[in-house]
Image (cartoon, rainbow, N blue to C red):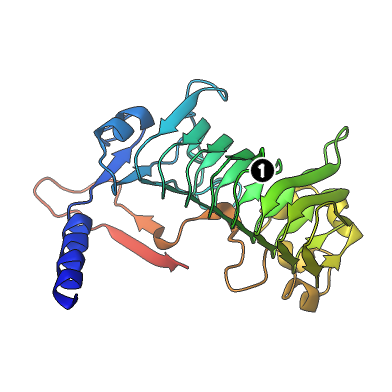
Amino acid sequence: MKKTMLVLAAVAIAAAANAKILRVSNVSGSSAPYTTLEAAHDAANSGDTIMVDASSTMYTSTVSTNIDITKKLVILGPGYWLVKDGIMQEGASTAEVGRFTIKAEGVVIKGMSIHGLFINASKAVINRCYINDITIYKPVSNVVISQNFITGAPSCNSGGGSFHQVTNNIFSYNSVNTSNLVLSGFDQSYIAYNTFRSQYTNIRATNSTIEHNLWTSFNDKGSDNSATDNYVASVLFTQSTSDFIDQDYRNSIEIPADVMSKYGAFAGDSPYVLAGIPSGPVIQDLIVPTSVEMGSKMNVTIKIGMQK
């Protein structure tokens, strides 16, 4: 048995070593080898990472254009609201796509701006994205939706599986005509540490744990749920979207600090990250001389920080 485990470990290490990083950019003058996500996806193998540059132009032709993800990939964008948060000074604000349909197990998407997300395979991880709508299909299970800014409400189509984790997201849903946010179809799932910016929040789940959430009002529309230790704060519905972009949001919102530390998206072990910047190294400052003399070295200074 030990010999078999060693062989399996060696195979796993070899597979990880063979994984590639493919860079995509539709910015004019970029040196990236791929200009479309479709081309990078077709060239990638299962286990590869596709890194998508920030851009002022969408990576799909329209908000309804769909991209099928049929391989186990990591798709890594730069985050969102990059200009508004002062992370980038102008132009490129995010990596925006119309629709993703996940058809392979274990897909990871981080730091993207997505108009529609359709999850048709288990063990997907959606992290630090800006998303309009999410639909999980049956019998998908073990989907992680965490640290995202979501303007719609995730739903499990026809009872779309179980054991999902929905944590540390900000749900912003207070349109003039529709102020009732409904999470539906979740079974044996964990829904915790979310901030719901809606007038009413209804959760239609079964056998699920619902805790440490922050909302204006709440109704448990499901059955056999454990919905305890959540916090009601009417001020959430009066906040504007810009309040959630502001770096000083946690200090400016009219909710006591001790409440913010225990409830909502900024609480818990994996708090919401402003602008959705993925974890890992981040270029914080770049100093490049405007000119150098012929034959001289160009001294470039790069300041790199680590985003947790």
Seen as rendered, the residue at the extreme left is: 295
Q: Decide: few, some or many residues near mark 1? Use Cα within 10 Å; few <14, some 14-19, many ≥20.
A: some
Where's the N terminus, which quadrant? bottom left
Which is more toward the observer, 92 or 73? 73
Q: Is residue 112 left or right of residue 240?
A: left
Which is more toward the observer, 82 or 97? 97
Which is more toward the observer, 297 or 279? 279
Q: Which residue is mark 1?
A: 159
The residue at the point 71 percent across, 54 percent down is 244
In x, y percent, where is residue 136?
59, 41
Quick one: SS at disc 1?
Answer: loop
Seen as rendered, the residue at the extreme front is: 1
Q: Is residue 63 left or right of residue 26?
A: right
In x, y percent, where is residue 91?
50, 36
Residue 26 in view (yes/no): no
The residue at the point 19 percent across, 63 percent down is 13
Is 70 rendered above or below residue 149?
A: above
The residue at the point 12 percent across, 52 percent down is 296
| Residue 286, picture quadrant | bottom left
Residue 92 in view (yes/no): yes
Is 165 rendered above or below residue 62?
A: below
| Residue 264, picture quadrant | bottom right
Identity, as a three-letter code, of the amino acid under mark 1 = Gly
In x, y percent, where is residue 44?
26, 38
Is 109 rendered above or below residue 35?
A: below
